[in-house]
Image (cartoon, rainbow, N blue to C red):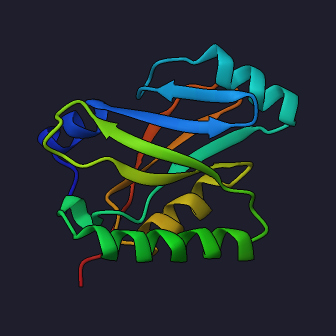
Amino acid sequence: MAKTSELEALYRATTYRVFLPGGHCDLRIDQPCEKLSCWLETAGASNFAIITACNPGSQLVDAAKNAEQQSLLECDLLEGNYEPYAGENVADDAAWPVEESCFVADIAAEDACALGQDYGQNAVVFGGADGVPRLLWIEYGDA
């Protein structure tokens, strides 16, 4: 599914909760989070990404399939020598289920997007040391 204003609005109407050592952070797109920027500084990390394998293409998938795909994503991250932390994407619209996600520090934007693409995602959340999460849309070539 291509980027649309409706799809972007849905991503922006979501809280991206990440569970880090010392507590959790609730992130919103384009809104700074001092707690996260402090954590990144302490960890010596220059950037971060939030990636999920759930509900590819923004199409609902059953919980078992989402859990299976999320486990595979976590394995891919570990095999890539990343240290994923647990996260969850909580839509403002309670009709959309909470999605498991992975918070990853020090991952290149290209690598985060490649993983998102591997799991059929429209976008990933990415940010720098300032702790401001932004949407990175994944480009799919015409098939």
> Is residue 10 positioned above or below 140 on the image?
above
User: Can residue 71 be seen?
Assistant: yes
Is residue 5 found left or right of 97 in the rendered image? Answer: left
Check the picture and name the quadrant holding the C terminus.
Answer: bottom left
Is residue 23 placed above or below 111 in the rendered structure? above
Quadrant of residue 127 in the image? Answer: top right
Residue situated in front as seen by the camera: 33 or 5: 33
Q: In which quarter of the image is residue 42?
A: top right
| Residue at horizontal 52 percent and vertical 72 percent from the top | 71
Q: Return the x and y of residue 32 as percentages of the image width and height.
A: 54, 17
Looking at the image, residue 49 lies above or below residue 26: below
> Which x, y percent locates residue 50?
52, 48
Would residue 15 be found to the left or right of residue 131 on screen?
left
Is 120 positioned to the left or the right of 113 in the image? left
**Residue closer to the observer: 78 or 86:** 86
- In the depicted structure, whether residue 34 falls above or below residue 77: above
